Amino acid sequence: MSIWDFLFTAKGEMALAGIAGSAVSVVMEWTGFLSGIRRLFVGAVTAYFLAPVGLPMFKWALGQIDVPVEQSAGVGGFILGIGGVIIVEIILKAFRIRRAELRSAVDDKA
């Protein structure tokens, strides 16, 4: 499968929507070229892999707004692209907190 063929699949649409959403995030909060590249990458990857979570999250966040099914993947991917960096930071922070708790518990036993 070529990259061109991939772009026309559901996952490809989700990744493109994630890139578009993260591009908006980069433009709105410009902090430099390397940071922008990082955000584009994280937005695309987050949208690609968190799509099953993103669509229900999108429906929950926007309530009664009715989006046609064929466009919901793109909209969900766009939202995940915008918030991808934040989502990843929250997940990593949760892991760091849990690791600190486990180390503290081990140190208390010693």
Image (spheres, grey):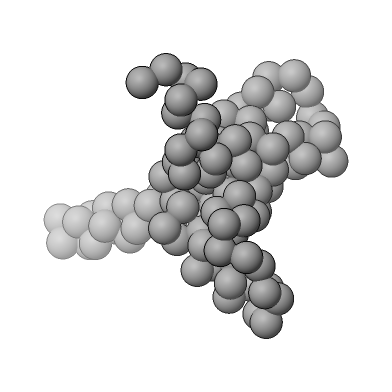
Estimate the x, y position of residue 63 in percent, counting from the top left: 66, 80
The residue shown at (51%, 21%) is 4
Quadrant of the image containing the N terminus: top left
Q: Is residue 59 above or below residue 4?
A: below
Q: How many marks?
A: 0
Q: Name the outermost residue toward the left.
A: 110
The residue shown at (77%, 40%) is 24
Estimate the x, y position of residue 51 in percent, counting from the top left: 46, 52
Quadrant of the image containing the C terminus: bottom left
* Frontmost residue, 108 versus 34: 34
Can residue 81 be spotted in the picture?
A: no
Residue 6 lies left or right of residue 83; in this view the side is: left
The residue shown at (65%, 23%) is 37
The image quadrant that residue 31 belongs to is top right
Q: Name the outermost residue toward the bottom.
A: 64
The residue shown at (51%, 34%) is 8
Estimate the x, y position of residue 98 in percent, counting from the top left: 34, 58
Residue 49 lies left or right of residue 27; in this view the side is: left
* Frontmost residue, 56 versus 12: 12
Residue 35 lies left or right of residue 100; in this view the side is: right
Can residue 60 be spotted in the picture?
A: yes
* Frontmost residue, 8 versus 39: 8
The image quadrant that residue 100 belongs to is bottom left
